[in-house]
Image: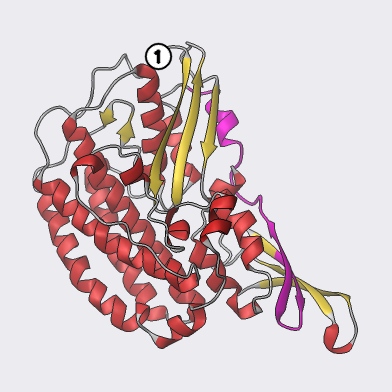
């Protein structure tokens, strides 16, 4: 953990109080910093010090055409951009009153579950560093690269794929691509057993996270917590089931939940989600229909969208990711508002959970919430 500045602000003797500025140039605080007041090595108060990343996504979206916003708005969450571009595209599709073809629904589902796995593997890298178990972090980065290579073959890009467009998807699946994906899926299913032995069942991880930063179901709901952080409290709340989209209505899968709402439950919910996502991909590949990949839409560079408003949401790797889009009938949105999970998890919830924890536990609490700093700064 990188402490940029430390200064005494009050107290005497053993009751001295210090202010620490942690981050932002460190992987455990990501691209934002936290200002904590400590007494000894116990956190008395924590304040998120954000604002180190790109800003004003929503205002910028009002000055770009609907299609130009796809490569812009996916940058709201760098580790998981595909869910952002899908939610935005779904909102535009509602305004246009179009339904995407069945083949596009299944391809979107495959891409979104690949994105979920990739994001969770990237999170595993950060969590392994937070508790000092670096081996599995190196594994997860290497295994994530297998999915990135498949993304590159499918979309032409490694990170920002710009693939889910209003009306469907940009490209069809290349010949032999699903066979390569199945090999990676089979590899990951075997690999997870090794992850369990080295990391998820490791006494160090369990000791560092069990009972840490607990939150009840009632507290989570009152704050607006969603995604794995809510499911860790025991609530099976997942928009893939509750408000299904893409091909999720046709796929059978479980919703993993925790029991205590602590850091360990949040960790294990994400671990189980990787396994479930692998199974969803296998089902989607097996049932993948033939046919078109795009619905008939106006010319993408200058079509006008009928007046109205729409809200579309998806279950991203971090929770509810939604876009509220208002059209005035022109070729660009009149208003775009983003409902991202990280502002709640990375500000309100984080500041609440850091109180009374030890300094050494700050990275564990932070990583257990899996925030996306661009979503906070937007």
Quarter of the image with the N terminus in it = bottom right
Span shown in magenta = 35-64
Res. 146 visible in picture: no
Residue 187 vs 277, above or below: the answer is: below
In this picture, residue 21 sits left or right of residue 281: right
The one nearer the camera, 363 or 45, is: 45
SS for callout 1: loop
Q: Is residue 39 magenta?
A: yes
Residue tagged 1: 302
Q: Is residue 105 visible?
A: yes
Q: What's the residue at 85%, 82% (across, down)?
A: 16
Q: Position of residue 144 (x, y in %)?
A: 31, 62
Q: Check if residue 366 falls in the magenta segment.
A: no
User: From what the image shows, is residue 139 above or below residue 168?
Assistant: below
The residue at the far front in this view is: 218
Classed neighbour count for the residue bearing mark 1: other residues with Cα under 10 Å, few (<14), some (14–19), many (≥20) = few
Residue 179 placement, left or right of 120? left
User: In the picture, residue 345 is in which quadrant?
Assistant: bottom right
> Which residue corresponds to the image point at 29% horizontal and 20% vertical from the top-left?
98
Residue 142 image-quadrant placement: bottom left
- Please state the horizontal and vertical placement of residue 301, each as a whole percent of the image: 38, 18
Asked if residue 257 lies left or right of residue 246, the reply is right
- Where residue 304 sits, quadrant-wise, is top left
Give the x, y percent position of residue 332: 48, 18
Percent of width and height locating residue 165: 33, 30
- The quadrant the C terminus occupies is top right
């Amino acid at each position: 953990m990188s402490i940029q500045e430390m200064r005494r602000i009050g107290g005497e003797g053993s009751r001295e109080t210090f202010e620490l500025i942690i981050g932002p140039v460190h992987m455990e605080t990501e691209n934002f910093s936290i200002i904590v007041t400590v007494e000894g090595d116990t956190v008395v108060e924590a304040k998120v010090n954000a604002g180190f990343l790109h800003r004003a996504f929503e205002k910028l979206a009002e000055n770009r055409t609907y299609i130009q916003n796809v490569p812009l708005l996916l940058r709201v969450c760098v580790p998981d951009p595909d869910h952002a571009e899908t939610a935005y595209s779904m909102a535009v599709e509602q305004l246009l009153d179009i339904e995407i073809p069945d083949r596009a629904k299944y391809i979107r589902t495959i891409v979104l579950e690949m994105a979920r796995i990739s994001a969770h593997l990237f999170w595993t890298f950060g969590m392994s560093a937070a508790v000092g178990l670096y081996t599995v972090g190196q594994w997860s980065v290497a295994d994530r690269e297998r999915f990135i290579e498949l993304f590159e073959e499918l979309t032409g890009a490694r990170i920002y794929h710009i693939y889910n467009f209003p009306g469907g998807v940009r490209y069809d699946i290349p010949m032999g691509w699903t066979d390569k994906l199945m090999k990676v899926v089979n590899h990951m299913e075997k690999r997870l057993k090794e992850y369990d032995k080295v990391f998820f069942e490791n006494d160090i991880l369990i000791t560092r996270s069990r009972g840490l930063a607990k939150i009840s179901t009632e507290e989570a709901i009152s704050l607006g917590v969603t995604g794995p952080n809510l499911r860790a409290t025991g609530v099976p709340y997942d928009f893939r089931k509750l408000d299904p989209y893409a091909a999720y209505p046709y796929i059978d899968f479980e919703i993993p939940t925790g029991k205590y709402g602590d850091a360990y439950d949040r960790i294990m919910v994400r671990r189980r989600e990787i396994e479930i996502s692998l199974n969803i991909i296998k089902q989607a590949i097996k049932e993948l229909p033939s046919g078109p990949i795009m619905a008939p839409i106006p010319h993408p560079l200058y079509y006008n969208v009928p007046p109205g408003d729409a809200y579309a949401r998806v279950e991203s790797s971090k929770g509810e990711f939604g876009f509220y889009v208002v059209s005035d009938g022109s070729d660009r949105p009149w208003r775009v508002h983003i409902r991202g999970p990280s502002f709640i998890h990375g500000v309100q919830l984080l500041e609440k959970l850091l109180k009374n924890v030890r300094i050494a536990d700050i990275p564990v609490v932070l990583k257990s919430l899996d925030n996306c700093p661009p979503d906070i700064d937007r």
